Image (spheres, rainbow, N blue to C red):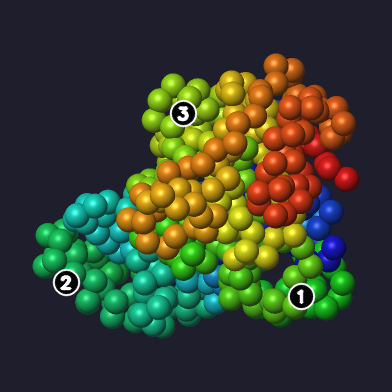
Amino acid sequence: MPVQVVVGTQWGDEGKGKYIDMLAAGADVVARFSGGNNAGHTLVVDGVKYAMHLLPSGILHPHTLCVIGNGVVVDPAVLIREMDMLADRGVDLSRLRISERAHVILPYHRVLDALQEQHRGAAIGTTRRGIGPAYSDKAERCGIRMCDLLVPERFARQVRENLSIKNRIIECVYGGAPLDPEAIITEYLGYARRLAPHIGDTVSLLAEAVEGGRKVLYEGAQATFLDLDFGTYPYVTSSNPVAGGVCTGSGIGPRQVDDIIGVLKAYTSRVGEGPFPTEQKNDIGDRIRELGHEYGTTTGRPRRCGWLDAVMIRFSARVNGLTALAVNHLDTIGRVGRIRLCVAYEKEGRRTRDFPADLDQLALCSPVYEDFEPWSEDISGCRNWNELPVEARRYVEAIETHCGVPVRYLGVGPGRESLVLRG
């Protein structure tokens, strides 16, 4: 399929990197379309772990052109560190393209992010890396884009104008220390010189690739329930990581997308605050966390863990238009003991399969479970559907039934090769 999209169906950290890496091997172009360095993909290649936060995962494939789309907010310092890390490992960075329309994260965004989180009545759980304030400036039409960074006089004027307001907010509202605009200008113009060869018109580049029949893979960051519109608001990110974000975040038209793969874990995990109907605040949740190594790629924070919620995945399937599912950590869930799958919610004596927008209503929902037998066999070496234990196959088939989307891939271990393709 010429144009494929990979998105997360839960609260992020589903292991999208494995499938992006696999599909990138056959792609001509890999593009990222949303988020910033608040996201991360961890790939294990030949026993070497790569944790990337801004660079598309396809950068590890020497034939692949990699694009950071206009929907991404870019911290130049983080991007350059990541580029240097990969260059030191022999990765060719000449294949990287950055949209001239992408917005830039500046020091005052990071400062405001931390101060706002600190002064909220109830913390959202941001990474404090400036993502939200950068998107706020984009919507407020005072953002600075990569194309601005390449014009020193314009960039300097924009920084000074913005800081004349931002410093007042930092000092007068939050009691913070003001930032020096001249220091920021000098620092960022240094970044501009380094990144200039990579910055350009990625909208035309991607359009020409699609029109030429080349294989293009769009790499999602974060996930459906962190989406600004469809997630568990306000405990969400500041962009649209659903499949529709591909269009606004890269410039492709919706009719050009052929295949949308939703990645999930065989259980549920999340970082941050907010209702979590199937969360297990007990030995089961602790066991899932330890077996699945559930600690954040970007922050190292321990993740909250619980049973797989088919109500969530069904909602994800609808808003993303999923054509297939990829289920990770099938090996993990089989070692937990008796397995439970949430197939509906019960609230005030009524059963529903719809996911509510109101978090107070979500907090009142009790999961309705179906139970499944575990399996004792080590499935990490399985590469064929028929090699899986019958109990594992029954669990996967139940996921398909309750979510309404076929399961195409199964992750049975951490390595890029630890996959079962269901034909």
Asked if one can make out residue 267 in the rendered structure from this viewpoint, the answer is: no
Residue where numbered disc 1 is placed:
256
| Circle 2 or circle 3, nearest the eye | 3
Is 75 rendered above or below residue 373?
below
For marks 2 and 3, give the CA distance.
45 Å
* Image side of residue 129 versus residue 164, left or right: right
x 50%, y 28%: residue: 289
- Give the mark, 1 or 3, whose residue is nearer the N terminus: 1
- Give the mark, 2 or 1, whose residue is nearer the N terminus: 2
Q: Choose between 398 and 164: the one closer to the eye.
A: 398
Where residue 177 sits in the image (x, y, percent)? 17, 59
Disc 1 marks a residue whose amino acid type is Gln
x 49%, y 64%: residue: 230
Residue where numbered disc 2 is placed:
168
Q: Quadrant of the C terminus?
A: top right
Where residue 382 sits in the image (x, y, percent)? 81, 27
The label number, if any, that marks residue 285 in the structure image: 3
Disc 2 marks a residue whose amino acid type is Arg
